[in-house]
Amino acid sequence: MALTYQDYYRGPSPDQSREHVRGGAIWEFIRDMDGRPVYIKLKLDNCRGCVWMSFHEADRAPRLPYQ
């Protein structure tokens, strides 16, 4: 709930899943949690609103465009 533009990684991207017929866009974020980069993937779905798709420790800490 506390994501900001500084956590933004990339997006919006088209949904490539089989549910793409619903429309919506994929947004990806990397947020520091207790000194570890955490990858967060959300979908803004036309029917369901904001859908949490993925949440896990990032393999690496990529350069974020707004940090």
Image: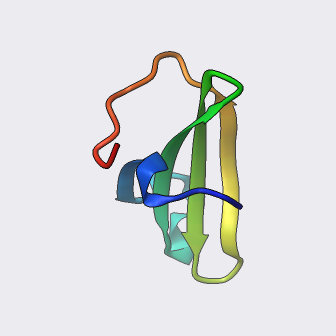
In the rendered image, the vertical position of residue 16 relative to residue 32, given as above or below: below
Q: How many marks?
A: 0
Left of 15 or right of it: where is 51? right
> Residue 9 location, x and y as percent?
40, 44
Placement of the N terminus among the 4 image quadrants: bottom right
Residue visible at 59% across and 56% down? Answer: 3
In the image, farthest residue toward the top: 59
> Residue 61 location, x and y as percent?
45, 22
In the image, farthest residue toward the bottom: 47
> Residue 45 location, x and y as percent?
59, 74
Q: Who is closer to the viewer here, 16 or 4?
A: 4
> Residue 52 location, x and y as percent?
70, 55
**Which quarter of the figure has residue 13?**
bottom left
In the rendered image, the vertical position of residue 5 relative to residue 48, given as above or below: above
Placement of the C terminus among the 4 image quadrants: top left
In the image, farthest residue toward the left: 65
In the rendered image, the vertical position of residue 39 relative to residue 20, given as above or below: above
Left of 42 or right of it: where is 8? left
Q: How is the image coloured?
A: rainbow
Residue visible at 63% across and 21% down? Answer: 36
Residue visible at 43% across and 51% down? Answer: 6
Q: Who is closer to the viewer here, 1 or 26?
A: 1
